[in-house]
Image (cartoon, grey):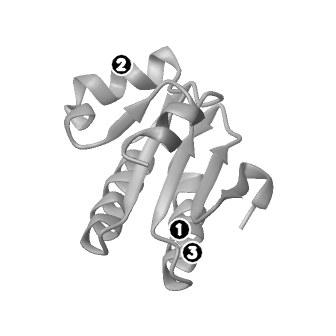
Amino acid sequence: MNFSDFTLKYYKNIAIIRINLSRATLKQAGSFNKLLFDMVKNDIKKFIIEMDEVEFIDSTFLGALVINLKKIKQLNGKLRLINLSTPVSTIINHTGLNKIFEIFNSREEALNYNA
């Protein structure tokens, strides 16, 4: 796994994962899945995914986000997306995924929503 692709920070019991990629694709989807799987296994159930560097996201990485959202929701957890670039926001809106993800413009908004 290339850890430089993702930066991990914690705020209380919330994992904040910054995606350090301009292109989030099949190549990194497996590492992303493993990262979240390991964290869920260690009882982390609240995530904020920071995506301001991502200019392109492919269907495989989108699928990884959806799969993890479903798993985390089953555990009564949260997965929120923040700081979407315009191209990623457009893709998420066109695919209808904006209806299933909680999307925020800043880390503070995501942390404070239903805190």
Q: Is residue 48 left or right of residue 72?
A: right
Q: Residues within 10 Å of mark 3 (few under 14, many from 20)?
A: some
Q: Amino acid at mark 2?
A: Thr
Q: Amino acid at mark 3?
A: Met
Q: CA distance from mark 3 to mark 1?
A: 5 Å
Secondary structure beneath dot 3 equals: helix
Residue drawn at 77 percent across, 60 percent down? 3
User: Which residue is nearer to you in this view: 48 or 86?
Assistant: 48
Above or below: residue 72 compared with residue 28:
below
Residue 96 placement (x, y as % from top left): 19, 32
User: Which residue is nearer to you in this view: 56 or 44?
Assistant: 44
Residue that extends furthest to the right in the rendered view of this protein: 4
**Contact check, label 3 and label 1, Cβ < 8 Å:** yes
Looking at the rendered image, the disc whose residue lies closer to the viewer, 2 or 3, is: 3
Residue at image mark 2: 90
Q: CA distance from mark 1 to mark 2?
A: 25 Å
Secondary structure beneath dot 1 equals: helix
Of mark 1 and mark 2, the one earlier in the sequence is: 1
Q: CA distance from mark 2 to mark 3?
A: 29 Å
Of mark 2 and mark 3, the one earlier in the sequence is: 3
The N terminus lies in quadrant: bottom right
**Contact check, label 2 and label 3, Cβ < 8 Å:** no
Above or below: residue 68 compared with residue 105:
below
Q: Which mark is residue 76?
A: none
Q: Which mark is residue 36?
A: 1
Above or below: residue 105 compared with residue 48:
above
Residue at image mark 3: 39
Q: Quadrant of residue 15?
A: bottom right
Residue 52 placement (x, y as % from top left): 61, 28
Q: Amino acid at mark 1?
A: Leu
Q: Quadrant of residue 70?
A: bottom left
Residue 26 placement (x, y as % from top left): 50, 52
